[in-house]
Structures are given as C-alpha cells and as structure tokens.
Image (spheres, rainbow, N blue to C red):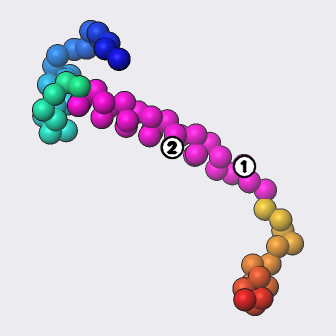
Amino acid sequence: MATNLAIDDKLIDEAKTIGGHRTKKAVVTEALKEYIQRRKQTKILELCNTIDYDSAYNYKEQRKKK
C-alpha cells in the first residue's frame, strides 16, 4: 500500500544512521514494528497484580506427585 507521509527528513536521516538502515521505508517499517511491540508489552504489564492466587495452593505438594 503506497502512502505519502510528511515526516521530518532530519528525523528520518538520524534514524537511518542509528539503525543502520539504507532506505526510508526500512526506517519506517522498523519504527512501526518497535511501536507495536512496545504497545503489546505495555498491555502485558497492565496485567501485573491482577491475578489472584489461591492461598491454599501448595506447590511443594504438587512436586511430590511426580
């Protein structure tokens, strides 16, 4: 899908240098991948402290059954 975006050339050039990319497309693609990955990680972190553990669960007992 062809898309025209007005992105600051200085930002693109800096990202190309830092990321070792040869093209603007490679820079934008990598940036989108990192953006998506970070958003998914944020959703996972939101799950922290939301799990209720059974206080009667005895993991040591489970190990004995093997």
Amino acid residing under circle 2: Gln
Q: Which residue is mark 2?
A: 41
**Residue 57 rendering spot, x and y as whole percentages:** 82, 73
Amino acid residing under circle 1: Thr
At mark 2, the secondary structure is helix
* 60 in magenta: no
**Residue 44 rendering spot, x and y as whole percentages:** 58, 45
Q: Nearer the viewer, residue 21 or 50?
A: 21
**Number of dots carrying numbers:** 2
The quadrant the C terminus occupies is bottom right
Location of residue 53 with respect to 36 vertically, above or below? below
What is the spatial separation of the Cα atoms under label 1 and label 2, in whole angstroms?
A: 16 Å
Crowding near the residue tagged with mark 1, few <14, some 14–19, many ≥20 C-alpha atoms within 10 Å: few
Q: Residue at x 52, y 40 (%)?
A: 40
**Residue 58 rendering spot, x and y as whole percentages:** 80, 78
Q: Which numbered disc covers residue 33? A: none
The magenta span reads 26-52
Q: Is residue 30 left or right of residue 63?
A: left
- Dominant SS in magenta: helix
**Residue 28 rendering spot, x and y as whole percentages:** 28, 26
Q: Which residue is mark 1?
A: 50
Which comes before the other along the chain, label 1 or label 2? 2
- Looking at the rendering, which quadrant does residue 32 occupy? top left
Q: Nearer the viewer, mark 1 or mark 2?
A: 2
Q: Nearer the viewer, residue 25 or 48?
A: 25
* 33 in magenta: yes
Q: Residue at x 72, y 85 (%)?
A: 63
